[in-house]
Image (spheres, grey):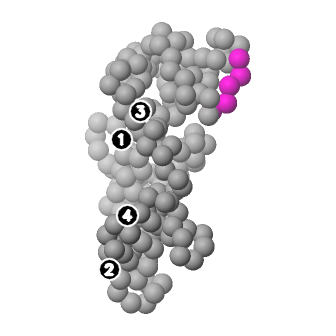
């Protein structure tokens, strides 16, 4: 997720908090006036789920942002995001390029660089994931952020009949043209399992 999208999501959370709930550090949740009755739990669940997704993305985006800042400020070179994704810095270089939102916690930033981005095990895992993504001949599916169960319910609503898990799986991976798949591996899997 791009940094702009992360910020947009955080702003949505802030609006939701203003309307329904307030996160009070170290003391849990507190009801704020203006929240419709019965919506507090739903609002908590939404905020909790968004935060679970945002924290790993913040570290991912923060590393890339730090590489761009380092090249721009320290080396005096402008680089694009795609280039920054391929570059690894040292712990000292990451510390020289702390993004604005992490400036109040330089020790935490250094720790993240040391334990995550400069850790050899993390680098190996990252390279393997990049290699897997490069092997994909297209999108892995077309069902957006829906879970399989939610996607199956959507398909059943459109087709106005019950569908099997396999049929829901297949429909979530269909290509732009009728009878094609969004990824060649999906077609191979369907042939392998006689779908």
Q: Of the residues tagged 4 and 1, which is closer to the observer? A: 4
Question: Which residue shows up at 45% across the image and 87% down it?
Answer: 159
- Cα–Cα gap, marks 4 and 1: 48 Å
Q: Which of pointers 3 and 4 lies earlier in the amino acid sequence?
A: 3
Instruction: State the SS at label 1.
Output: strand
Can residue 61 be found in the magenta stretch? no
Question: Which residue shows up at 42% across the image and 72% down it?
Answer: 170
- In depth, the one of 179 and 61 nearer the eye is 179
Residue 6 vertical position relative to residue 146 in the rendered view, above or below: above
**Residue 34, x across and y down, in percent:** 46, 61
Asked if marks 3 and 1 touch (Cβ < 8 Å), the reply is no
Q: Which residue is mark 4?
A: 189
Q: Which residue is mark 1?
A: 24
Residue 24 vertical position relative to residue 116 in the rendered view, above or below: below
Neighbour tally class for label 2: few under 14, some 14-19, many 20 plus, Cα within 10 Å: few
Q: Which of pointers 3 and 1 lies earlier in the amino acid sequence?
A: 1
Q: Residue 126: give its label.
A: 3
- Cα–Cα gap, marks 3 and 1: 35 Å
Q: Which residue is mark 2?
A: 164
| Residue interval drawn in magenta | 77-81
Q: Which of pointers 2 and 3 lies earlier in the amino acid sequence?
A: 3
Instruction: State the SS at label 4.
Output: helix
- In depth, the one of 94 and 16 nearer the eye is 94
Neighbour tally class for label 3: few under 14, some 14-19, many 20 plus, Cα within 10 Å: few
Instruction: State the SS at label 2.
Output: loop
**Left or right of 178: which side holds 172?**
left
Q: Which of pointers 4 and 1 lies earlier in the amino acid sequence?
A: 1
Asked if marks 3 and 4 touch (Cβ < 8 Å), the reply is no
């Amino acid at each position: 997720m791009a940094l702009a999208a992360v910020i947009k999501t955080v702003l949505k959370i802030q609006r939701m908090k203003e309307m329904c709930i307030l996160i009070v550090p170290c003391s849990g949740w507190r009801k704020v006036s203006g929240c419709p009755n019965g919506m507090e739990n739903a609002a908590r669940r939404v905020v909790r789920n968004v935060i679970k997704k945002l924290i790993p993305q913040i570290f991912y985006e923060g590393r890339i942002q730090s590489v761009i800042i380092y090249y721009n400020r320290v080396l005096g070179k402008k680089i694009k995001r795609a280039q920054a994704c391929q570059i690894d810095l040292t712990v000292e270089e990451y510390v020289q390029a702390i993004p604005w939102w992490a400036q109040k916690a330089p020790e935490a930033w250094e720790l993240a660089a040391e334990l995550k981005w400069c850790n050899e095990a993390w680098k190996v895992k990252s390279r393997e994931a990049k290699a897997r993504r490069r092997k994909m001949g297209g999108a892995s599916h077309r069902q957006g952020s829906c879970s399989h169960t939610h996607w199956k319910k959507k398909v059943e609503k459109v087709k106005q009949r019950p569908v099997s898990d396999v049929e829901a799986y297949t429909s979530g991976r269909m290509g732009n043209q009728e009878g094609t798949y969004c990824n060649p591996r999906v077609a191979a899997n369907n042939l392998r399992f006689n779908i």
